[in-house]
Image (cartoon, grey):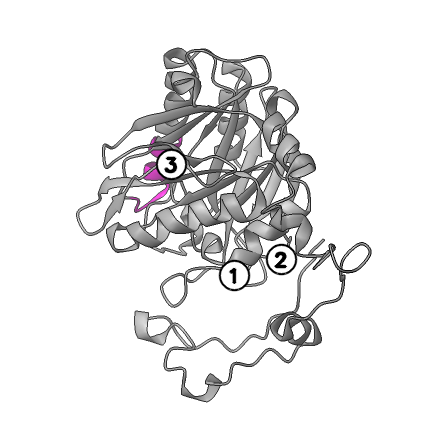
């Protein structure tokens, strides 16, 4: 149960608000400033509307819209005015917040970055999208791994962004590092609706973890984002979901303590544990080897599909981007 969207908060609950923010049109710095102000106003609205709310979550592209514009004049920095405004909004309203920025990169294309800021205005989690939505997005692949932070009311939080959630490895990594609640922010449009729903549910159940996911919403005159906020419990059931109503805040209470209870007490379908303890009924402690060829090959730098030579789209030229000539230098995953 969701505690009637947080209206009846339990002592161990975490109330999450997912903002189906209206998709903006962003052209220049004035648009960025106006959208920053709107986001901060929505933080205040979340606090007024649901006094029990612990964290308010804004979608990917909440600040920049879906133009994929890499114009330096509209890019952000961690020490820039937009992030400072988000910190102040969280502090002034005594609420945690999750925000999206397109971050300037002095050595290449911008990063698609996500931030979690606590109710004192301090940055608690900083993530760069590992899997930009190719061939559509021009962002630099993330280089910070999947961080996990202490969240409100004793919870553990992780953040992934949009296309990241289509890779089961992302949710598994977040859970492996202790996340009990995984936020997923997105700008997806309607053709992805079914995949969005089933991946959010599978990510939750496969890792005994709450998933809280939200897209941009409405039209910018070119694209229509779908909203579709949803919170899935650790058994994969959908606790609450929104539709396509722009600027709606979809809320629910989740229970990280019950996540911990399931992870510690379940025998059947405790898959996050059983992955590394295969067949523990037959052999003491279970098998702890890695039987997966793709994992071993990826680590060794030789990941290659049997149909690799026949893959048709392997760069962004089909979407109007120039062929890149820089090689990836590796990240600081950990």
Residue 176, position as x, y percentages in the image: 67, 48
Q: Nearer the viewer, mark 3 or mark 1?
A: 3
Determine if residue 78 is in view.
Answer: no
Residue 20 versus residue 106 in the image, above or below: above
Q: CA distance from mark 2 to mark 1?
A: 9 Å
For label 3, the residue is 230
Q: Earlier in the sequence, mark 3 or mark 2?
A: 2
Disc 2 residue crowd, few under 14, some 14–19, many 20+, Cα 10 Å:
some
Residue 105 located within the stretch drawn in magenta: no
For label 2, the residue is 143
Q: CA distance from mark 3 to mark 2?
A: 28 Å
For label 1, the residue is 140
Residue at x-position 25% and y-position 35%: 243
Q: Foreground: 97 or 172?
A: 172
Circles 2 and 1, Cβ within 8 Å, touching? The answer is yes
Determine if residue 32 is in view.
Answer: yes
**Element on which disc 1 rests:** loop
Circles 3 and 1, Cβ within 8 Å, touching? The answer is no
Residue 88, position as x, y percentages in the image: 53, 22
Residue at x-position 75% and y-position 59%: 282
Q: CA distance from mark 3 to mark 1?
A: 28 Å
Q: Which residue lies most toward the left here? A: 221
- Specify start and end residues of the magenta stretch as a single range: 26-36
Residue 121, position as x, y percentages in the image: 59, 23
Q: Foreground: 85 or 268?
A: 268
Residue 57, position as x, y percentages in the image: 45, 32
Residue 84 versus residue 173 in the image, above or below: above
Disc 1 residue crowd, few under 14, some 14–19, many 20+, Cα 10 Å:
many
Query: In the drawing, does residue 214 fall left or right of residue 94?
Result: left
Q: Quadrant of residue 29?
A: top left
Q: Which residue lies most toward the bottom here? A: 309
Residue at x-position 49% and y-position 54%: 164
């Amino acid at each position: 149960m969701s505690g009637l969207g947080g209206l009846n908060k339990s002592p161990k609950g975490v109330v999450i608000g997912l903002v189906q923010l209206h998709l903006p049109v962003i052209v220049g710095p004035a648009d960025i400033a106006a959208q920053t102000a709107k986001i901060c106003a929505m933080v205040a609205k979340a606090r007024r509307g649901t006094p029990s709310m612990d964290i308010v979550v804004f979608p990917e592209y909440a600040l920049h819209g879906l133009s994929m514009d890499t114009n330096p004049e509209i890019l952000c920095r961690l020490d820039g005015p937009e992030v400072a405004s988000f910190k102040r909004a969280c502090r002034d309203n005594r609420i945690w917040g999750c925000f999206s920025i397109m971050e300037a990169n002095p050595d290449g294309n911008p990063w698609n970055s996500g931030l979690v800021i606590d109710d004192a205005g301090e940055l608690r989690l900083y993530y760069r999208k590992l899997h930009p939505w190719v061939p559509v997005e021009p962002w630099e692949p993330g280089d910070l791994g999947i961080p996990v932070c202490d969240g409100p009311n004793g919870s553990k939080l992780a953040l992934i962004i949009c296309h990241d959630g289509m890779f089961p490895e992302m949710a598994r990594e977040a859970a492996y590092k202790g996340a009990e609640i995984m936020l997923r922010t997105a700008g997806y449009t309607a053709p992805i609706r079914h995949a969005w729903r089933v991946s959010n549910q599978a990510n939750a159940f496969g890792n005994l973890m709450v998933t809280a996911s939200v897209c941009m919403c409405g039209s910018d005159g070119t694209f229509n984002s779908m909203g579709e906020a949803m919170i899935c419990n650790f058994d994969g059931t959908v606790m609450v979901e929104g539709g396509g109503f722009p600027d709606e805040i979809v809320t629910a209470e989740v229970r990280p303590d019950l996540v911990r209870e399931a992870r510690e007490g379940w025998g059947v379908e405790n898959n996050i544990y059983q992955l590394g303890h295969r067949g523990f009924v037959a052999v003491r402690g279970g098998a702890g080897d890695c039987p997966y060829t793709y994992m071993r090959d990826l680590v060794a730098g030789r990941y290659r599909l049997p149909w690799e030579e026949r893959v048709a789209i392997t760069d962004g030229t089909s979407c109007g981007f120039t062929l890149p000539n820089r090689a990836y230098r590796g990240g600081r995953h950990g």
